[in-house]
């Protein structure tokens, strides 16, 4: 992915934006948890919907996807935290959420994360083909 920042090993570098994730979870009622992974000027948001049916009535489509209004709110939050971000991509895909969770946990615990670079890159390309 040509939008990625490369490190010495010519691998894409992904950062976890914890402040943006916390604000998304705090400010958007239907989001139960979120991870924001940034690379260069892009942010990829892995969101977990609140399972409380009352909260999901507003903000999701009949198919269970987030409405464009909610995605815009998420984008505004991410860009307010990091004004270098030009593009925000949001997914409620559970596999992407789990992968982002594992990546963030391994980073926090100081474990090597090189193997996640290709996994995250592949997932991003599959979920957000418009960003190729």
Image (cartoon, helix red, strand yellow):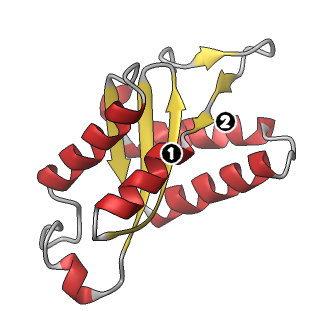
Question: Which quadrant holds the C terminus?
Answer: top left
Question: Which tag is nearer the camera, tag 1 or tag 2?
Answer: 1
Q: Residue at x 73, y 15 (%)?
A: 7
Label at residue 118: 2
Disc 1 residue crowd, few under 14, some 14–19, many 20+, Cα 10 Å: some
Image coords of residue 126 (percent x, y): 44, 43
Image coords of residue 4 (percent x, y): 54, 19
Q: Residue at x 73, y 14 (%)?
A: 10
Image coords of residue 106 (percent x, y): 78, 51
Q: Nearer the viewer, residue 120 or 48?
A: 48
| Left or right: where 113 falls relative to 118 | right
89 in relation to 103, above or below: above
Question: Can see residue 92?
Answer: no
| Left or right: where 72 falls relative to 18 | left
| Left or right: where 3 falls relative to 9 | left
Estimate the spatial distance between the alpha carbons at disc 1 and disc 2, rounded to whole Å: 25 Å
Label at residue 103: none
Q: Residue at x 23, y 71 (%)?
A: 64
Circle 1 sits on which residue?
A: 19
Most extreme residue toward the right is 111
Q: Nearer the viewer, residue 31 or 67?
A: 31
Q: Residue at x 40, y 19 (%)?
A: 84
Image coords of residue 52 (percent x, y): 31, 87
Q: Are marks 1 and 2 in contact (CB under 8 Å)?
A: no
Disc 2 residue crowd, few under 14, some 14–19, many 20+, Cα 10 Å: few
User: Of marks 1 and 2, which one's residue comes earlier in the chain?
Assistant: 1
Question: Can see residue 109?
Answer: yes
Q: Secondary structure at mark 1?
A: helix
């Amino acid at each position: 992915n040509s939008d990625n920042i490369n490190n010495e090993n010519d691998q894409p570098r992904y950062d976890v934006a914890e402040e943006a994730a916390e604000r998304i979870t705090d400010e958007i009622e239907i989001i139960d948890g979120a991870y924001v992974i940034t690379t260069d000027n892009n942010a990829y948001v892995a969101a977990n919907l609140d399972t409380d049916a009352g909260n999901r009535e507003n903000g999701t489509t009949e198919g269970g996807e987030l409405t464009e209004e909610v995605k815009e709110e998420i984008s505004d939050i991410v860009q307010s935290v990091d004004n270098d971000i030009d593009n925000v991509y949001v997914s409620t895909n559970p596999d992407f959420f789990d992968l982002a969770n594992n990546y963030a946990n391994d980073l926090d615990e100081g474990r090597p994360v090189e193997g996640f670079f290709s996994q995250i890159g592949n997932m991003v390309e599959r979920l957000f083909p418009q960003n190729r």
